[in-house]
Image (spheres, rainbow, N blue to C red):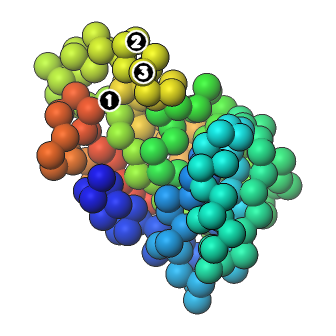
Amino acid sequence: MDDVTAERERVIPLARGVVLEIGMGPGLNLPFYNPLHVTKIIGVDPNDAFLHLGEVRHRSSRVPLEIMRAPAEELPLSDDTVDTAVITYTLCSVDDPELALGEVRRVLKPDGRVLFLEHGLSPEDDVARWQQRLNPIWRALAVGCNLTRPVAELLQRAGFSISDMEEYYLGGTPRVLGFHCRGVALP
């Protein structure tokens, strides 16, 4: 998925300081962290199978990496300890995205920021109707992934302000699967 890799390459180099990445899984973002700007990555994921897929990538991280097996809804971190939170292709599959984002806000320093790259609910009614129809089937096939999460709305309901965001359809992807949001949110 070259298009998805290119999207990750646009977002991840913006990370600074101590980074929390929820949904670390196989570590697909790791090659794009800049070791000159990131002092440590705390990768959180409850799924042992996904983490196992990334063991080689995790070991070869250019930035010190700590893996925590935990759900995003219960981050085992103290308040105000993270400079940057990275959320890529994760909000679609967490059980409670509002609770997870509340936890991210809790551990983020007051001057921190969230870098996000997510797919979700299209603002176009025709596309959104198809997403609603297909979501039960897609969720069963795609390891709990939802097509219908309103990314910007979820961030705002969790108390974040969106300082920069682009919404678009990823090229070469059916519109029902390809609506994306990429940007920066502040606590």
Provide the residue designation for mark 3: 141
Q: Crowdedness of circle 2 by 10 Å Cα count: few (<14), some, many (20+)?
A: some
Distance from label 1 to label 3 (Cα)? Answer: 18 Å
Quadrant containing the C terminus in the rendered view: bottom right
Horizontally, residue 130 falls left or right of residue 136, namely left
Instruction: Please tell me the numbered disc located at residue 136.
Output: 2
Q: Position of residue 110 (x, y in %)?
A: 68, 63
Marks 2,1: beta carbons within 8 A: no
Give the mark, 1 or 3, whose residue is nearer the N terminus.
Answer: 1
- Residue 36 vertical placement versus 116 (above, below): below
Q: Crowdedness of circle 3 by 10 Å Cα count: few (<14), some, many (20+)?
A: few
Is residue 5 visible in this depiction of the protein? yes
Give the mark, 2 or 1, whose residue is nearer the N terminus.
Answer: 1
- Residue 108 vertical placement versus 35 (above, below): above
Which residue shows up at 60% across the image and 55% down it?
54
Instruction: Please tell me the numbered disc located at residue 121.
Output: 1
**Res 59 quadrant in image:** bottom right
Q: Position of residue 181 (x, y in %)?
A: 33, 47
Instruction: Please tell me the numbered disc located at residue 61.
Output: none
Distance from label 2 to label 1 (Cα)? Answer: 14 Å
Which residue shows up at 22% across the image and 28% down it?
176
Which residue shows up at 47% across the image and 68% down it?
12
Which residue shows up at 61% across the image and 27% down it?
96
Please name the amino acid that badge 1 sits on. Leu
Is residue 104 visible in this depiction of the protein? no
Please name the amino acid that badge 2 sits on. Pro
- Residue 128 vertical placement versus 64 (above, below): above
Q: Position of residue 137 (x, y in %)?
A: 37, 13
Give the mark, 3 or 2, whose residue is nearer the N terminus.
Answer: 2
Residue nearer the viewer, 187 or 169? 169
